[in-house]
Structures are given as structure tokens and as C-alpha cells.
Image (tube, helix red, strand yellow):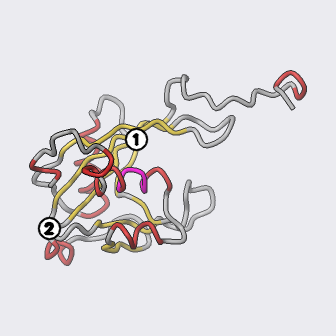
Amino acid sequence: MTTEDTGRDTTIALAKPPRNDVAAAILVDETGRYLLQLRDDFAGLPMAGHWGCFGGALEVGETPEQAMRRELAEELAWEAREMYPLAVGAFAVWPGTPVLRKHFFVVPFRAEEVSAMVLGEGAALGLHTIAEACALERVVPWDLLGLMAHARHRQYWPDRPVPDWLK
């Protein structure tokens, strides 16, 4: 059945400007484990009850890095010493869904810092290897793409130099 047959627009419109601009932290410790947030299970919350990256929407006039730093302070009461842009992805899951643009940042931390973090949003936090993250039953799919881009950088882009912060 085509658009002409149904009278509905069935295209996934990635060409449209994003309605939502979001910063997301690929929080990685010295052993390569990722700190993820179990999202609250509230009705109407996108990806409720799923594991995903810490982060959130950019506020008016805010850069992605400013938003990332603000979100980490709000969600973990923690200040990142350093962060590095990793990737930007645009996602539209099905026709009619608003386009989401997600700015992924690699945010290194030390494992012992987790005990001082205060969960200000979400149901839980947890450290996961990439294999454990991939095996989670409920995980935000675009966040998993960001984790994989970080974890498998050498595999996906073998001819590109690996920056020190990504090693």
C-alpha cells in the first residue's frame, strides 16, 4: 500500500529539523564499564523503564556541552572533569514521530566516584560492560548505538586514528 492508497504520509522524515535536541553521556570508567540510568517507569515518559544514557534536552540558548554538564549535575550531583564529543545521531522511529537529534559525549570517570554520585532522576543506576549493556532486555536503542560506537571504535573504523581519550 502506498501513500496515495492510504492518504497518509508514511515517510520517516529525517530531513525535517529535529523537534528534540538532546545531550547524552557515554559515561565510561577506567575498566571500560558504562554507567547507565534505569529510566523511571512513568506513563508517557519516552522509553520508560529502559536502561539508557544520562542526559536530557538542551535548553534555549544552551550548547550541547553546556546541557551535558547541567544534566550530569542535575541527575547525578556530579561534575565531569572532561568530556569529548563522540557522535551526533538523528532518529525518527516511525512515521509521524518527532525527529530526535542526540549529541553523544564520552565522559570518563573513576569507578570509585559512583558511590559519591546522588541519583536525582531515574529509578536506578548501574555499571555495565558493553556485553551486559547489549544483553539488557530493555535498553534505549539509540543509546545502545552510542555505546557501541564508543566500545567498537577500532573495529568499525580501523583506518582512523584513535584519539587518546577514546582508548
Please state the horizontal and vertical placement of residue 166, each as a whole percent of the image. 17, 51
Of tags 2 and 1, which is closer to the observer?
Answer: 2
Q: Does 68 sit left or right of 109 as displayed?
A: right
Q: Quadrant of the N terminus?
A: top right
Rendered location of residue 63, percent (x, y): 27, 33
Residue that label 1 marks: 102
- Residue 88 is left or right of residue 16, and the answer is left
The kind of secondary structure the magenta stretch mainly shows is helix
Q: Amino acid at mark 2?
A: Glu
Choose the circle earlier in sequence order: 2 or 1. 2
Residue at x-position 42% and y-position 51%:
145
Which image quadrant: the C terminus? Answer: bottom left
Disc 2 to disc 1: CB gap under 8 Å: no
Q: Secondary structure at mark 1?
A: strand
The boundaries of the magenta stretch are 143-147
Q: Which residue is mark 2?
A: 30
| Position of 167 relative to 63 (above/below) | below
- Quadrant housing residue 34: bottom left
Q: Within 10 angstroms of label 1, few (less than 14), some, or many (20 or more) residues?
A: many
**Residue sitting nearer the eye, 47 or 44:** 47
Instruction: Tell me which residue sits at (42%, 60%) in the image.
Output: 52
Residue 33 in picture, x, y percent from top left: 26, 69
Seen from this angle, which residue lies furthest right?
Answer: 5
Disc count in the image? 2
Residue 83: mark in rendering: none
Q: Is residue 133 magenta?
A: no
Type of amino acid at the residue the image marks with label 1: Lys
